[in-house]
Amino acid sequence: MSQERWDVVLRFLSGPLQLKGTVVARGPVVRIGAKPGPGGLDLSGYRALDDRHAVITCYEGGEVAIAPVGVNQVRVAAHAHVDWAELQPIRGPVYLSDQSVIHLGSVERGATFEYVEAQRLGVWQKHQIISDAAQVNPEIESSEVKELDASRGIPRWFIPATVVMFLFTTAVVLIPNIEGWIKGEVPMIGPDMEGEEYVVYVNESIPIEQHLFEGLKQPFADFVMGPNAQVAKWSELAKNDKLWDKRFYEYTTRSVSAHARGWRFWKRLEAVREDYAYVVTELRKNNLPEALAGIPYQESQYRPEALSYVCAKGWWQFMPETANRAGIQVSGCQLRNVKQRWTPQEPIPVRGVARNAIYTRGTGKCLITGCDVDERTDLQVATRGAIELLGEAWRDRDFRSSGAAVQLTILTHVAGYHDQRFAKPGQTYMNILPKYLRYLKRNKLDRAADFYGKNLTCDKLKQTDQKSIDARCGGILSNHAQHYAYNIVAQHILAVCYYGKNYSDTKVFKDWRQYAIGDGYCNTHIKVPTSEEVQRRSGK
């Protein structure tokens, strides 16, 4: 008989173990704390840690997770350069990736270490298999650890010890959650700080909480993968999450967590309820995915007068030329220090808008002070134009067969669909369609359901820095486009929760009630505030 064994390699960044270099903790179950028991990782030299503070599990194949024991504080980040005070402690198991950094205990004290790798120590052969019972059951002393002599068959102690090991491992990981179930408490993400109305970007410093990661599969399937599968005629795509764009889903989960914790986000949803309902209604009428209703939230937070530094304006933040192409009238615009009024005539903006457009002239500011007519601030007109442009992308044959039609369509709103059709001689535009086709050709693919996630490569986005906006970090999409679609899907997933819980008597939100009751994801994983709570905090 043989069996693989995996250990966990850690590097401490603080305290007594910092000078030891890497520390190898024996798997598959590693108890960590001030008094972890036989076989555990002893951190008695660190202050303010519980006897058994956390548990790391490393299963066959090298998949590693960490979980707090009880209510002990455990924080996880993608790197060490974080403000631990800004990260919420995890509430359940979280999977670790290489170079994940973990902090145990309160922010001011405790231990900080880096997860280096899961180390496969070959295969145990006969006379070399050591019972793990002593490692995972403190009631078994190390003197009781037996050697398995395979030549004599399976000894009597082996099966009971294996059962003990399994039961103890299961209990260590699940008891905190079982205690919560007994008390009627379920780990949920909800508003616990003022936060922001919207999040510009998230990255891997925001840990993926396992219960949320599993719970959001329901809405992600309904609002993203279901529509993708339907237009691709690829039914398995909606059912089998192994076929999904994993990185896109992970970033959507992080974005849901970041948005849901901010009261300002929920307050804004309350304020824009009627406008959100209007956009969803129009999308449904035109057979477009409901998730597109998140676009004007990310763009303007549903504000009609929102204006960007490159003169994108209104609910959907249309550029003047794009509005012109969509039949949204923009005319008689007054440019600062220019006497003659300007009206867009072209169907697409010039390349390098911030530097080359007549209404920016390289100043980094919008120089339009006002227009005689500007229908970008009219919700009905602007939404009609958005549906026309988004519908063109949604109906594209290559997009529909991709398995990624929803996210590709969303990306066209920020990076264009196929502007080369309107380019003048000598001009080259690389929007989402040509980039997607180039990606397929380069990788010799017929379709790419994970196109977006494979090109989500930049870690940060600075909206006021054009170099940051245009960066690609090894991907094919601009940084601005990379940190776009997942936020929109996340905001819509949460809007469904808020409106489904508080306003399901409104016809347009009626179907969303299913998500806010019973085992719907809003009711089991998101701590959705009531409209009364939001209004009280808004001073109404």
Image (tube, helix red, strand yellow):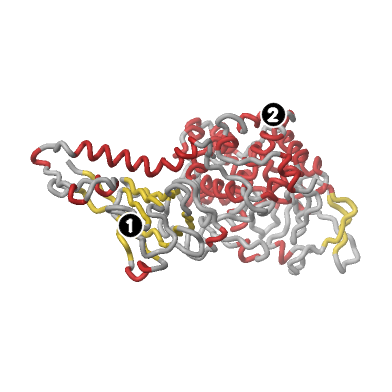
Q: Is residue 449 visible?
A: no
Q: Nearer the viewer, residue 175 or 239?
A: 175
- Which quadrant is the N terminus positioned in? top left
Place of residue 283 in the rendered image (x, y in percent of width and height, measured from the top left): 70, 35
Which picture quadrant has residue 337?
bottom right
The residue lying toward the viewer, choosing from 515 and 140, is 140
Name the residue carrying label 1. 41
Name the residue located 30 percent from the left edge and 48 percent from the top edge.
28
Q: Are circles 1 and 2 on residues that touch, CB within 8 Å?
A: no
Local packing at callout 1 (Cα closer than 10 Å; few below 14, some 14-19, many 20+) is many
Mark 2 residue element: helix
Q: Which sits in the foreground, 276 or 270?
A: 270
- In this picture, residue 69 sits left or right of residue 499: left
Q: Give the percent coordinates (x, y) of residue 244.
A: 49, 41
What is the spatial separation of the Cα atoms under label 1 and label 2, in whole angstroms? 52 Å
Q: How many marks?
A: 2
Name the residue tied to disc 2.
Answer: 510
Is the C terminus in the top left, top right, bottom left or bottom right quadrant? top right
Q: What residue sits 22% from the left and 51% below the top?
A: 122
